[in-house]
Image (cartoon, rainbow, N blue to C red):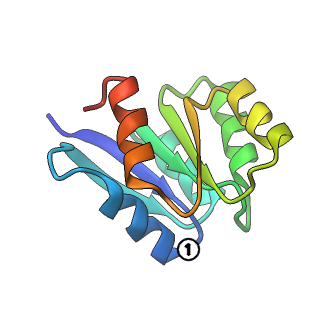
Amino acid sequence: MALPVLICDDSILARKQVRKSLPESFDAEFQTAGNGLEALAVLRSQEIGLVFLDLTMPELDGVGVLEAIKAEGIDCFVIVISADIQPEMQKRVMELGALAFVQKPVNEDKIIGVLKQYGFI
């Protein structure tokens, strides 16, 4: 059965890059969101197993999404993908429950490594 995956980034190009960085053998059903509010609407309305989440977005940023996921007890795994590589931000998202922090631009080997580490592939 395919894993329901949400890719949330305000850049269409970045969403495509995340998807292209995933191995063809990764059995997933993809959805996308252009900001945090759209992501939360998806997460609240259906079961999503894995979220690839950008931090800097309009409407609601990635930290706000992580806070809502934690506060509402939404059951999903989150991998943050962001250009904001400040150590304080990395620490903050990990405290909020992210599995991993991957620096943009997306590195295929890094994504695959995280997916293997957590048993997604």
Kindly tell me whether residue 70 is visible in this rendering.
Answer: yes
Residue 44 position (above or below residue 42): above
Residue at 42% from the left image edge and 50% from the top image edge: 6
Q: Secondary structure at mark 1?
A: loop
Outermost residue to the right = 88
Where is residue 100? Give x, y as percent.
Answer: 56, 34
Where is residue 85? Give x, y as percent.
Answer: 74, 50
Q: Amino acid at mark 1?
A: Ser
Residue 20 position (above or below residue 30): below
Q: Quadrant of the N terminus?
A: top left
Residue at 50% from the left image edge and 69% from the top image edge: 14
Residue at 69% from the left image edge and 29% from the top image edge: 94
Quick check: 98 left or right of 30? right
Residue 74 position (above or below residue 58): above
Quick check: 62 left or right of 6? right
Where is residue 29? Give x, y as percent.
Answer: 25, 49
Q: Quadrant of the C terminus?
A: top left
Quick check: 95 left or right of 103? right
Outermost residue to the front = 109
Residue at 55% from the left image edge and 29% from the top image edge: 99
Alpha-carbon neighbours of circle 1 within 10 Å: few (<14), some, or many (≥20)? some
Where is residue 40? Give x, y as percent.
Answer: 58, 48
Res. 95 image quadrant: top right
Q: Nearer the viewer, residue 110 or 41?
A: 110
Quick check: 19 left or right of 60? left
List the residue tagged with mark 1. Answer: 11
Kindly tell me whether residue 49 is visible in this rendering.
Answer: no
Res. 54 image quadrant: bottom right
Q: Nearer the viewer, residue 39 or 12?
A: 12
Q: How many marks?
A: 1
